[in-house]
Amino acid sequence: MARVCHILAKFRFLNGWLSVRFVNIAIRINMKKLRILIVFLPLLCSTCKKEEVDPVWYTDVAPDQSVTSMIPFPFTIDDVKKNNIGYMMGEGYNSRIVSGMASVNVDLNNDAKLDFQFQVIHSLLNEGAGRIYDEYIHIGSFDDYEISLSDQANGNIKRYDFNEEIDDSSFGNVPFSGKHTVAYLVRKNAEHNLNNLGEFYLAIKVKSDNKSYYGWMLVETKMDPLSLTVKEYALSKVADKKIRVGQRE
């Protein structure tokens, strides 16, 4: 009987020892998990914040929107719609209309409100060396938003490269018609010979509640025929904070 009691006592001791051992192991495992959680929690929180606060409205115009004012003559309804022709006049030389205006509307923050409008305009009245001509591409805003300029006096836009810093001292625009202010990308006539051709960025500034929101646009311009392609654009969601040209997020 004494032997049985001795065995039972050993069993109870072993059972208690194992219970304590398992508890210690469980505590160590949980502490390890807790340390891992503490290490990764700031990373998880920072990821959540990044997903919640997207610093820009970015739009990839797909497909790219290309327009020209120099549509064929006789023109078709498709020619007019494709190039968003605002007005046109008669038959011109080289089987094109003599004058016309094509446009591209830009809504930077997808609020169904027109922020900027590009216009491609030409007037070719006479063929030959003595012809009167006027060809230009400009960007304008009815809300008096500003465009970065290289020439404040003439309203010529400033070209930017990818990842370039926006020059805050360059913003302005020139009156065009009433409240409509514009800046020129291309301007060719008897007085001007501005050719900003090829692919480049331009910078803009939108004003709301006495605050400024910076943005950029990627465009391409061509001659013969005079045409414009709008490819991408973005606007900062953070007031009074400049973004880099080409910044998408």
Image (cartoon, rainbow, N blue to C red):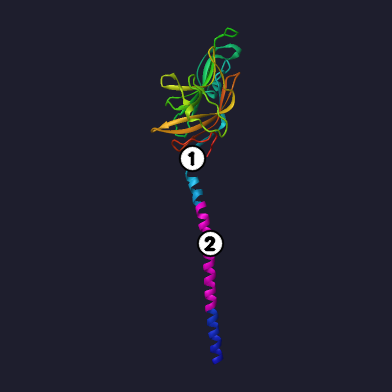
Indicate whether residue 21 is drawn in magenta: yes
Bounds of the magenta segment: 16-43
For marks 1 and 2, the one nearer the N-term is 2
Mark 1 sits on what residue?
55
Q: Position of residue 152 (x, y in %)?
A: 48, 22
Task: State whether residue 119 appears in this view.
Answer: no
Q: Residue at coordinates 50% horizontally, 49% vertically from top-left?
A: 46
- Mark 2 crowd level (few <14, some 14–19, many ≥20, 10 Å Cα): few
Q: Position of residue 50 (x, y in %)?
A: 50, 45
Mark 2 sits on what residue?
33
- Alpha carbon separation for disc pair 1 and 2: 34 Å
Q: Where is residue 14 in the image (x, y as percent from the top left)?
A: 55, 80
Please determine whether, in this image, residue 33 is positioned above or below residue 10: above
Q: Which amino acid does label 2 sit on?
A: Lys
Dot 2 falls on a residue whose secondary structure is helix
Please determine whether, in this image, residue 54 is positioned above or below residue 180: below
Q: Where is residue 111 in the image (x, y as percent from the top left)?
A: 44, 34
Task: State whether residue 99 appears in this view.
Answer: yes
Which quadrant would the N terminus be assigned to in this image?
A: bottom right
Q: What residue type is labelled 1?
A: Pro
Q: How many labels does the image show?
A: 2
Indicate whether residue 167 is drawn in magenta: no
